[in-house]
Amino acid sequence: MLMEGTGAAAPLAFFVRRWRRQVPLGMLFWRDMVVVGTALNLATAFAGLMALGFKADLAVAILIFHAPLPYNFFIVGAIWRTADLADRAKASSARLGALAWLVAATIL
């Protein structure tokens, strides 16, 4: 079994544990999505705008801006799957919040 820690398997274990529902829903939602995901999206949005400011090609700036999309879709999918283990109200709130965050992170 892969465990988070040091070594070459650590980055893979991060994703495996989340997809296998081994991380609590609250941690997925608040830390992985709201804090880490939002920081990642803000950083790449800033980098994309900086690329435009430095006269980079528009396609390059758009690619930089949308670089965190795979992480965004993954983390929302992991939240959606993990919500099955929570009570109905908490699951609905987490799913709705994750979808709203995904739309906001993709458009803004």
Image (spheres, rainbow, N blue to C red):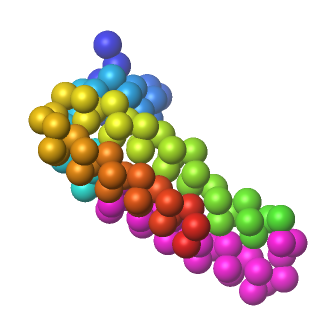
Most distant residue in the bottom direction: 53
Q: How many marks?
A: 0
- Residue at 41% across / 33% down in the picture? 15
Give residue 58's position: percent from left, percent from top: 83, 72
Residue at the image position 63 percent from the left and 73 percent from the top: 47
- Would residue 75 be found to the left or right of residue 60 on screen? left
Task: Name the foreground residue: 49 vs 54.
Answer: 49
Asked if residue 50 lies in the magenta stretch, the reply is yes
Please identify the dominant SS of the magenta region: helix
Q: Is residue 12 left or right of residue 46?
A: left
Q: Magenta stretch?
A: 31-58
Asked whether residue 14 appears in the rendered view, the answer is no
75 sits left or right of 20 in the view: right
Direction from residue 57 to residue 16 in the image, left or right: left
Say if the magenta span includes residue 44. Answer: yes
Rendered-image quadrant of the N terminus: top left
Question: Can you see residue 35?
Answer: yes
